[in-house]
Amino acid sequence: MFCKRVSKYNPIHRNTKGHYTRSDWTSYHDIGHRFDKGVLTKDRYLAVENSYVVAVYSFLNTYSIASLKISELELYDIQRVDLQNTNSDPMREIIKEGYLLQGNEIEYCVRLILREKIWCKLTGAEGIFIHFGYDYYMYFGCDLDMNLLPEPPEGIFFETFSTPYE
């Protein structure tokens, strides 16, 4: 099994124990708070969230994975989800244990996880998995050569690292 940790944290700012040494936001709920790079605005947050989504699709496209299954689902605040600025979001109904996500449903689910509305593991063919951790960490894994992954989107970093969620 091969695994990469995916994050917005530049590894050059880690100490010898691997701890990130800068003051940086770790949650959607940090919008409006001040950090080393200034106040986290909704636009700055969305730019990073978008990069995570691009990284997910890049990972899936590299290994020709078209669907991911939801497992170990935990619902937190799904009833107040409004990703599309509408009060009746039909995609809310897809978030179920065992559901096979395809196309833009994957993006929708990833954004819910990053915004701490839900938590789950995503799994697919070829041993593919995407796990999400605390402090805005994401983990990609598979049984295939991870060196095939293209460079991450700007502002996102890949590090060889085992998932803590197996």
Image: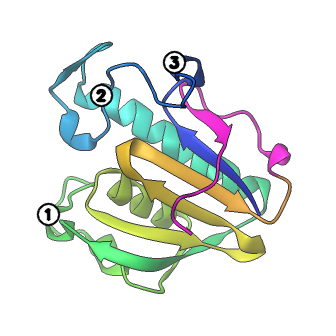
Q: Earlier in the sequence, mark 2 or mark 3?
A: 3
Image position, residue 50 (x, y; %): 45, 39
Report which residue position mark 2 lands on.
43
Residue 58 position (above or below residue 158): below
Q: Earlier in the sequence, mark 2 or mark 1?
A: 2
Report which residue position mark 1 lands on.
80
Secondary structure beneath disc 3? helix
Q: Quadrant of the N terminus?
A: bottom right
Secondary structure beneath disc 1? helix
| Residue in the picture at 68% in, 59% down | 141
**Mark carried by residue 36:** none
Report which residue position mark 3 lands on.
13
Q: Quadrant of the C terminus?
A: bottom right
Mark 2 and mark 1 in contact? Answer it, CB < 8 Å: no
Tell me where the magenta segment starts and ends, as one range.
146-166
**In which image quadrant can residue 29 be found?**
top left
Q: Residues within 10 Å of mark 2 (few under 14, many from 20)?
A: few
Residue 4 position (above or below residue 46): below
**In which image quadrant can residue 120 be found?**
bottom left
Residue 89 vs residue 135, the one in the foreground: 135
Q: Residues within 10 Å of mark 1 (few under 14, many from 20)?
A: few
Residue 38 vs residue 21, the one in the foreground: 21
Q: Is residue 16 magenta?
A: no
Marks 3 and 1, how far apart at CA: 36 Å
